[in-house]
Amino acid sequence: MSWRAGAALAGMALAAAAGAAPRDAAPEVSTRVSTVLTSAHCEAPGFAGLCRVIVADEGFEHVQSRVWIEWLSPRERGAPVRLRRMAVRDVGSWVLAPGPRGVDGRRVHFDATHTYSMERRARVLEFGPPGRYRWIDGP
């Protein structure tokens, strides 16, 4: 194969790959993300829409979960619009996994394991209006 033919073939391959990229491209998700849960419908005082919780596990020997909440407004067509995203500050030294009940309206149920004592318990995160949440221990 001549140099020109090889360059032309490589150029066509790059053009084909570039043309396929937007269609096949997925959003970049950190490898630390262990859970993404979205409610079917979430109502809180002054808010009706969708709520999403994102859990990422960090650490090596003593793993801990970091949690973010997103409040979303659905649209008639297309993806929902994110109204607000915030970090949940008071997770503590817990690793969170989705509980059997998962998302229940404006509550997310977790099976939690303490990273040092290995204590297990149910933890429930309740969504409020955008920017507000609270932890409820137990189911």
Image (cartoon, grey):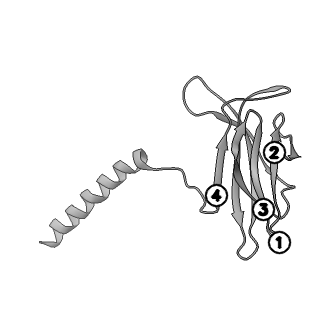
Side (left or right) of 37 relative to 109? left
Residue situated in front as seen by the camera: 32 or 126 = 126
Total numbered labels: 4
* Picture residue at 83% right of the left edge, 72% below the top: 116
Sequence-wise, the earlier of marks 3 and 4 is 4
Nearest to viewer (mark 4 / mark 2): 2
The CA distance from mark 3 to mark 2 is 15 Å
Spatial CA span between label 4 and label 1: 21 Å
In the image, 30: left or right of 15?
right
Residue 101, position as x, y percentages in the image: 70, 42
Q: Circle 1 sits on which residue?
A: 116
**Secondary structure of the residue carrying numbered label 2:** strand
Q: Dividing the picture into quarters, in which one does residue 8 lie? A: bottom left
Q: Amino acid at mark 4?
A: Val
Query: Where is mark 3, residue-wise?
Result: 113
Q: Nearer the viewer, mark 3 or mark 4?
A: 3
Q: Quadrant of residue 9?
A: bottom left
Instruction: Please indicate whether residue 136 sits to the left or right of residue 63 in the image.
Output: right
Bin the neighbour count of mark 3 within 10 Å (Cα to Cα): few under 14, some 14-19, many 20 and up.
some
User: Amino acid under label 1?
Assistant: Tyr
**Residue beneath disc 4:** 33
